[in-house]
Amino acid sequence: MLKLLFSNQLYLVLAQALVAAIGAVIVVLLARRRGIHLESETLVAMLRGIIQITAVGSILLLLLRAPRWTSVFLLAGMMIAAGATSARRAKNMPGAFRVSAWSIAFGSGSVIAVMTWLGVIDTAITSLVPVGSMLITNAMNTNGLALNRFRADVLAHAGEIETALALGADAKNSVSPYVQAAFESSLIPAIDSLRSLGIVWIPGLMAGMLLSGARPVYAAIYQFVVLAMIFAASGLTSLVSTLLIRDGIFTAAQQLSLQPGR
Amino acid sequence: MDNIPVTRSPNPDPILRTEHLGRVVNEKILVDDVNFEVRSGEVLAIVGPSGAGKSSLLRLLNRLDEPTSGTVYLEGTDYREIAPRELRRKLGMVNQRPYLFPGTVAQNLQFGPLQRGESLSKDSVEGLLSQVGLKGYGSRNVANLSGGEAQRVSVARTLANSPLILLLDEPTSALDETSKREVEASIQTVVRDQGLTCILVTHDTAQAARLAARALVLESGRVVRNGPINEVLHA
């Protein structure tokens, strides 16, 4: 119906945004009738959302016309931002940002580099950046899960860890069960994604390829390729981050520095 | 079990000596300028109210925490010059909670020796278990032990490292009266039979009187009294 009213594409998209926003306003009004006040929070979130996404859209427009080598800087920036986001999951853990940034850079960076070199990922910026961002995002999530689980386990088992230290165990051995648990649990989403592929969900990339006219079998296989790369990037990230963070929670005298209530 | 404190004549040279030992965390003083010494074969009780810094002091002796001032001398050597793992083996610690590792009693006893690539023979395991009154318990799963049995396994596990000094941090405070007496009896047996030097942290002055010959009273992290047990506890 909106297409009949607006022939100019800019006006059409603004009208679509307005109509979608009215849906959110209705929810706010319904909540208000029940005494729940979301007005200012929703207004700020919606304004931020439209400004941020429009800004990103404009930047992408410029970047997609940029030379191929710029994708390296773009992906490096994403890795640093992912490291900062992921480090928030490791509150009070010494060196969390450094560990997260290095782990994500190593895990996703090595998979992107090898796969691009082998020709699995196209070097065109329109291919490299979206696929690379998928690997970085998933590496970030895996890293966050690993650090969060490791931190929780160490805090819950500080007594067992210190008992092992007091019996002469070295720092690495005293936390090895928790390193293993953090690694395994962080990979559950990536494993489940592979396991349920095509049965529980049809991922966005495959749906997008189908909508743009790609052959279904080609789209399906490439989706598997992407998920396998995500698993590899996530696994490498988690492996590196759990090993690096393990060393960071002990002092030089092998004392546990991450303690409940400290 | 009798209630006579262990009163073997100690070696005149201190096996352990603290020098202006202190620890401050976030401007809170946990241990404040503590000076004392323990002679070989002696049993020293550290007593005081909750929050006096008793457990903090014991953690400093085992170097699970780092002193912010002063140091500890073990057999005349500054303990910062001893590798932490070797130091902790020599200063065996038993906590308030036993924290047994999943598996059998024997596997728990093997934990310490395995950390340095050694293994205990079956006879050694049985010998250690006999000392704590748990002969024949080697193959039992630790999940099926009572609180008192678990704590005695914890004592035996620490002894498996052949420590020079046994550090006991409120070893019976989480136990009922019967289990408490059983653990106390095990400690007395070990101290008597092996002539082991022992530092016992307890808030229970009666227990201190039963087990130790000398006591040190801590208040707000400072030593307020130090001397023979009867004099200190009745001062």
Image (tube, rainbow, N blue to C red):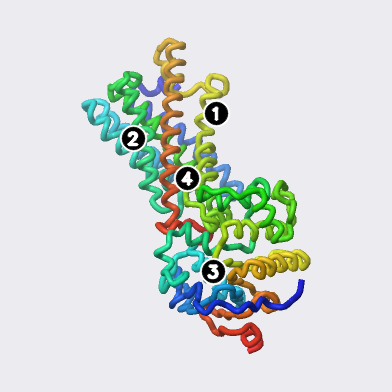
Q: Position of residue B172 (x, y in %)?
A: 69, 66
The residue at the point 45 percent across, 78 percent down is B33
For the C terminus of chain B, give its image quadrant: bottom right
Q: Residue under mark 4: which chain is it in?
A: A
Q: Residue under mark 2: which chain is it in?
A: A
In the picture, measured across the screen, residue B66 lies left or right of residue B40, that is left
Foreground mark, 3 or 1, reads: 3
In the picture, measured across the screen, residue B138 lies left or right of residue B62, that is right
Q: CA distance from mark 2 to mark 4?
A: 33 Å
Whether A65 is drawn above or below B93: the answer is above
Specify the label residue B58 is tagged with.
Answer: 3
User: Is disc 1 on the same chain as disc 2?
Assistant: yes
Along the polypeptide, which appears first: circle 2 or circle 1?
Answer: 2
Callout 2 touching callout 1 (CB < 8 Å): no
Give the SS element for disc 2.
helix
The residue at the point 37 percent across, 33 percent down is A108
Foreground mark, 4 or 3, reads: 3
Q: Name the outermost residue toward the right.
A: B178
Foreground mark, 3 or 2, reads: 3
Amino acid at the residue labelled 3 = Leu
Specify the label residue B83 is tagged with.
Answer: none
**Crowdedness near tag 1: few (<14), some (14–19) or many (≥20) residues, C-alpha within 10 Å:** few
**Crowdedness near tag 2: few (<14), some (14–19) or many (≥20) residues, C-alpha within 10 Å:** few
Q: Residue under mark 3: which chain is it in?
A: B
Specify the label residue A147 is tagged with.
Answer: 4
Can you see residue B205? Answer: no
Q: Which residue is mark 2?
A: A54
Amino acid at the residue labelled 1 = Asp
Q: Which residue is mark 1?
A: A192
